[in-house]
Image (cartoon, rainbow, N blue to C red):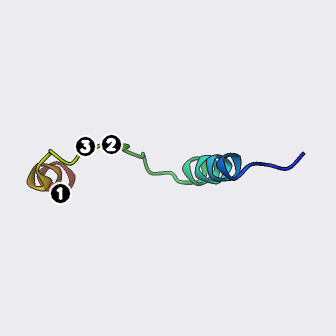
């Protein structure tokens, strides 16, 4: 059985995550959040 494109992406992301010693922060923006707030959070 062939692996779907979705499963390949999922496996690739999982491998990247597990190989990276840094913590990942996953966020979602619906486009209404000001970028300035993100910059303050990320760079301070």
Q: Closer to the observer: label 3 or label 1?
A: 3
**Label 3 environment density (alpha carbons within 10 Å; few <14, some 14–19, many ≥20):** few
Residue 31 picture location, percent across and down: 21, 48
- Quadrant of image for the N terminus: top right
Name the residue at 65% across, 48% down.
6
Sequence order check, earlier mark of 3 and 1: 3
Q: Closer to the observer: label 1 or label 2?
A: 2
**Label drawn at residue 8:** none
Residue that sits furthest to the right in the current view? 1
Q: Is residue 37 left or right of residue 25?
A: left
Sequence order check, earlier mark of 1 and 2: 2
Name the residue at 9% across, 55% down.
36
Name the residue at 63% across, 46% down.
10
Please tell me which residue lies in front, 10 or 17. 10
**Label drawn at residue 27:** 2
Cβ atoms at labels 1 and 2 below 8 Å apart: no
Residue 25 picture location, percent across and down: 36, 44
Tell me the element at label 1. Answer: helix
**Label drawn at residue 30:** 3
**Label 1 environment density (alpha carbons within 10 Å; few <14, some 14–19, many ≥20):** few
Residue 8 picture location, percent across and down: 70, 52
Cβ atoms at labels 2 and 3 below 8 Å apart: no
**Label drawn at residue 43:** 1
Name the residue at 42% across, 45% down.
23
Tell me the element at label 3. Answer: loop
**Label 2 environment density (alpha carbons within 10 Å; few <14, some 14–19, many ≥20):** few
Q: In the picture, residue 27 is in which quadrant?
A: top left
Residue 42 picture location, percent across and down: 21, 53
């Amino acid at each position: 059985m062939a692996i779907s494109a979705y499963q390949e992406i999922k496996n690739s992301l999982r491998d990247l995550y597990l190989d990276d010693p840094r913590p990942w922060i996953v966020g979602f923006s619906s486009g209404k959040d000001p970028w300035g707030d993100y910059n303050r959070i990320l760079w301070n």
